[in-house]
Image (tube, rainbow, N blue to C red):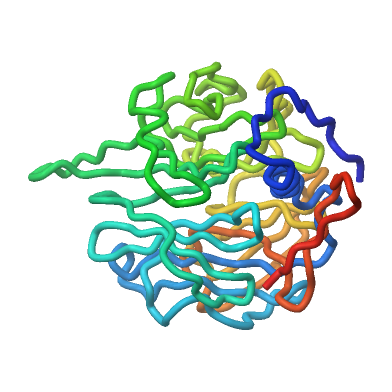
Amino acid sequence: MATLPLPARRFSCRSGFLRRAFLSAVFFGVGVFAARADLLVLRPGASGTGLPGGIVRLDDGRGIAQSEFGAANEGFDAMCLGPEGDLYVARDLLGADEIVRFDGAGRLRGKFAAVDGALVQAMAFGPNGDLYAIVRRYERDSTTAQRSIVRFDGRTGAARGVVIGEGAGGMISPAAIAFGADGMLYVADAQAGVLRFAASGEFIEAVVPRGRGGLEQAAALAFAPDGNLCVVDAAKDEVLRFAAGDGAFLGAWIAPGYELGAVAFGPDGNFYASRGRANQILRFDGRTGAPMGVFAMDAVLARAAGLLFIAPPQEQLALAGARTGATRLPRS
């Protein structure tokens, strides 16, 4: 598969290592990572569903549940892969989250950051090496949450404050975030569509405004191997495809009827998605969107709220582009 062009001048990574690691994360499934990868499936915390929470590792290629991250029944809300290959997880502690780190084998490395009085909905590392998170905070005696995007120092975990506040660029109900190959932060907002911000928090544009291509409620997004943007429309239960550059509508990609939730592109270039309450992970052709059947089905996959591909513990990540040759990082 072809490698996407890299607009280097838009990146401001603190080091060459972070730059290479970030690009590797962006292009996972486009030939930068090795072809093998396990799929991590996040189940929301018991406090939100009444069901056991946790993170399940599905075996590379076969979709068989192999192991759990963390202690049984922990309340996990969001997860993302760090530039060094560790897994960062927002863990619910009686109504407030903390962000912890696991290595690739599922061993807890320790606490990374505190999220005082708020819950984390989604996370992503930026090209500057910092962690960005959608947080929702409830004021005292209020049932209405205020949502914003908070930035954490990628080295120390120290909160660097709200980088994108509620209302910025029309952001009211952010549901998911992802950094694109242009180094910009893309926000799927249920009311506004897909918004694009600089890593500094500066609003750039509504790259896919609500209504374009019939989009009603952007609930999740993922960048395809060809660089275009796939957006889950929760209102219509379908996946739409847009050009990442100008947001041009490229067509309805996956038809309604699957009740798709969490989504991710795999290292094989195909599209994986959780299916509502059916305890299933489905696989679709990454080019055409054609269904390829059930990848995994197990009771432990109930209400999956996050999907993330991570290298098998016994292998190593290969990060391309090092000046002195390929840099290899341990996968566990």
Please tell me which residue lies in front, 17 or 252. Answer: 17
At horizontal 81% and vertical 43% (from top left) the residue drawn is 288
At horizontal 38% and vertical 74% (from top left) the residue drawn is 74
Instruction: From this view, report whether residue 150 is shown above or below residue 7.
Output: below
- Residue 269: horizontal and vertical position, in percent? 81, 52
Look at the image and tell me whether residue 130 can be seen.
yes
At horizontal 57% and vertical 78% (from top left) the residue drawn is 298
At horizontal 57% and vertical 32% (from top left) the residue drawn is 185
- Residue 242: horizontal and vertical position, in percent? 69, 28
- Residue 37: horizontal and vertical position, in percent? 75, 66
* Residue at the extreme left: 141
Please tell me which residue lies in front, 314 or 95. Answer: 314
Residue 326 lies left or right of residue 119; in this view the side is: right
Instruction: From this view, report whether residue 206 is shown above or below residue 132.
Output: above
Instruction: From this view, report whether residue 9 is shown above or below residue 3.
Output: above
Which image quadrant for residue 184? Answer: top right
Instruction: From this view, report whether residue 276 is shown above or below residue 151.
Output: below
- Residue 187: horizontal and vertical position, in percent? 51, 33
Look at the image and tell me whether residue 259 can be seen.
no
Which image quadrant for residue 198? Answer: top right
Q: The C terminus is located in which quarter? A: bottom right
